[in-house]
Image: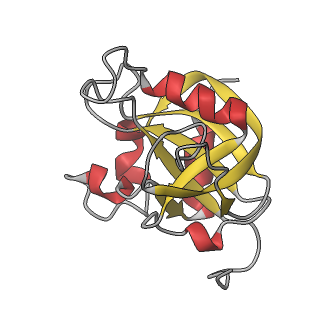
Amino acid sequence: MGTRILSGMATYIFSVRGEREKDNPDKKWARAVLHDRLAAGLWPLNKLTPHQRYLVAGDQVLFYVAGNADPDKHHIVAIAELAGSRVESVKSNDGLPAWIGSKALSYSVPLRKPHWLKEPISLRALVPHLSFIQNKKQWGTALQGGITRIPADDFAKIMEKRGR
């Protein structure tokens, strides 16, 4: 396991996409993909996912819908807490992670205390106020890679916008 960059709880944004039509003619929107992951209590990680070695129990996560075709695009739709560090994914008979079906995935991180937001939070509207987004014009690039570590202040700014 890697060394923590900072001590204490860390805050992240995990990006989720719906299934691509070429992969599945009965594709699921991002919300359905996220529902399955939260129900399983696991988040998939591939070998190149950033920050994965620093993830530990107690870290806070916001779930962001990436992509341009999804009804929830550019919104934070749920929150959760990490229940532990990354673990090797359970493999199915064909060698793929049993619940995700991708050869590139070999780890997952356990989740707990998932909570769906009453109203999705538009990240686009908050871009001017978020320090982790350096390029305000092409702000989506700040969320590439699947996991983005964000400062606690930015996490708090996003959470201030959630519906009660």
Residue at 30% x, 16% y is 25
* The image quarter in which residue 88 lies: bottom right
Image coordinates of residue 92 in percent, x first then y, are: 61, 43
User: Is residue 162 visible in this depiction of the protein?
Assistant: no
154 vs 145, nearest the viewer? 145
Residue at 67% x, 85% y is 3
* The image quarter in which residue 130 lies: bottom left
Q: Is residue 36 left or right of residue 13?
A: right
Q: Is residue 127 above or below residue 30?
A: below
Q: Quadrant of the C terminus?
A: top right
Residue at 74% x, 79% y is 7
Q: Residue furthest bottom?
A: 3
Image coordinates of residue 125 in percent, x first then y, are: 37, 37
Residue at 21% x, 53% y is 138
The mark tally for this picture is 0
Q: Is residue 85 above or below residue 77?
A: below
